[in-house]
Amino acid sequence: MNTLIAQLKFDGRRLILRNFSFQFFSILMPAGFYLLFTKVMVSGTVPMRFNLQYMASMIVYSGTISALFGIAQILMHDREQGLLQWLQLTPTGVKTYYLSIGLWSMVMNALAIVILGGLAVVFNHVSLTAGQWLTIVCVALIGQLPTMLIGVLVSFINGAETLSVVSNLITFPMAIISGLWWPMAMLPSWLQPIGKLMPTYFVNNWLGAVATHATLNATTVIGVVAWIGLLTIIAVGGTRQLLKRGDGVVKA
Amino acid sequence: MATIIQAEQLSFSYGQHQVLNQLDLTIKTGEIIGLIGENGAGKTTLLNLLLGTRPADSGALTVFGQAPGSLIAKQKIGSMLQGDMAIRGVTVTDLLTMAATRYPAPLSAAKLITDLDLTAFAQQQLTALSGGQLRRVTFALALISNPDLLFLDEPTVGMDTNAQQAFWQRIQALKAQGKTMIITSHYLPEIEQVADRILLLQDGRFVFQGTFAALQQRYQQVVMTFQTTLPVTTFDHLAGVTAVTSRHQAIKISSEDGDATLQALVPYLAQLQQVTINRESLSAIFVQLTKGAKA
């Protein structure tokens, strides 16, 4: 437990307190988007349902950004700097490290929910029960797992520039085609079935259902669970392979 | 003394490239081993096998009586590998404090910072440190577990002269405490002061294992220089002579048996001026050995 607490302190300082870009992209940008699309770039009265659904979308978007621009870059940086290999040589290994990074990512996501929720309440007069808010937090945290795992996979890429390009190529198309930025109905009909397979689509649907009291479709939950299962297998296998290969340690 | 490391017929290759070839090695408690060899000789690969980050292709290897990478080994080994961690947003104190929590009986981070004279930059972020400062932090990281066995891979690269001196003083102190160490280096003179035994690795094999004295006795040449009007061919076939070079009237003789060559020179002494006799530098031995092994 002491090791985990120390790792959390270590990561909290470097990832949150001393990392403005992480805060900006994970929280401030989705918050800005929310206000832009629900208050600034609208005319007339915006339906409450849209305010709720768009809040859910921006929570998912925040988690996606945090995973693909935060976690992926952090993991790659730590691997390139040899931190991962050093931790592997210690008696407590790398598990607490991954747990700490995951927990901090979830904390950031929870913070994003508080800020986005606060904006929704203050500016759009959204009103949800305590039970709904609690469910939103739980679903958002579970729903962040697929994108966190994608972040882990993307971190296997060598080179900061390549990683940035790949993160961009995944994040923004995935956000657009899964309906996070604007309603899916606005997309070409051939693109919509693809968007409906994205992990962010399932999570967005789930959160939207909680926020708007809509009926939750079973395929939504199955979709999230399936993505978590599939990506966990790939990410765990990939990480083991990477550590086994000893990248960054061996220089003959 | 107990055996800490035991390797028998240890081999490792990257694809078709044989990096380590049937190495036998025994290291006992308190020994300081100087592991030397050119770039690519397999020094770091051997360390990685000892650390358990890579499995050997064949052969037997135990560290503290167990397979490399065991929990016991991880608790007792401190390693200063090549490459330093310049992690963004992390200070020296942050890193050492976190590192200390990962071992059962660590040294205090604060005390280590004081002892290793890191106080001046202890609150600075790692990304703001110079290469030499980072190397010193990596050394502190290797010591934080209070290890019984230390792997030091090219430890002084990037350090300035003062830092190097402080580093070797610290190594002497650790030696006095009975710590076991394997130190890799390209530079023989700096490990001469501390190493009990030298292992010279060349093309995946140990081409020499022994003390520095044995190394010198076996390989160190005596160099004699003088001025003379005698033809250079006079000295070619004297006892012990391995090489003769001349420039104008200055002659330089290399000998593998200084006493024999000196005796053979006695008849000519009256015609020799400005005579100097020296032993070849340790660096020259290193070059000679590595070239010789390659030839």
Image: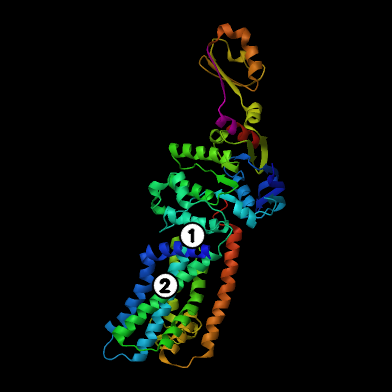
Position above or below: B264 against A182: above
Instruction: Check residue B277 for magenta coloring.
Output: yes
For image coordinates 52% across by 68% down, the residue present is: A99
Span colored in magenta: B274-286
Residue at disc 2, secondary structure: helix
> Residue B17 vs residue A179: left or right?
right
- Disc 1 vs disc 2: Cβ atoms closer than 8 Å? no
Distance between the alpha carbons at the discs numbered 1 and 2: 19 Å
Residue A39 locus on image (x, y percent)? 28, 84
Q: Amino acid at mark 2?
A: Met
> In the rendered structure, the residue with mark 2 lies on which chain?
A
Q: Which residue is mark 1?
A: A78
Position above or below: A94 against A149: above
Q: Which residue is mark 2?
A: A108
Residue A73 locus on image (x, y percent)? 45, 64
Residue A242 locus on image (x, y percent)? 58, 62
Query: Which label sits in the foreground, 1 or 2?
Result: 2
Please say which color scheme the image uses. rainbow
Within 10 Å of the Cα at label 1, are there few (<14), some (14-19), or many (20+) other Cα atoms? some
Q: Amino acid at mark 1?
A: Asp
Residue B31 locus on image (x, y percent)? 63, 40
Position above or below: B139 against A33: above
Query: Quadrant of the rendered structure where residue A123 is?
Result: bottom left
Of the numbered discs 1 and 2, the one sitting upstream in the chain is 1
Residue A169 in sight: no
Within 10 Å of the Cα at label 2, are there few (<14), some (14-19), or many (20+) other Cα atoms? many
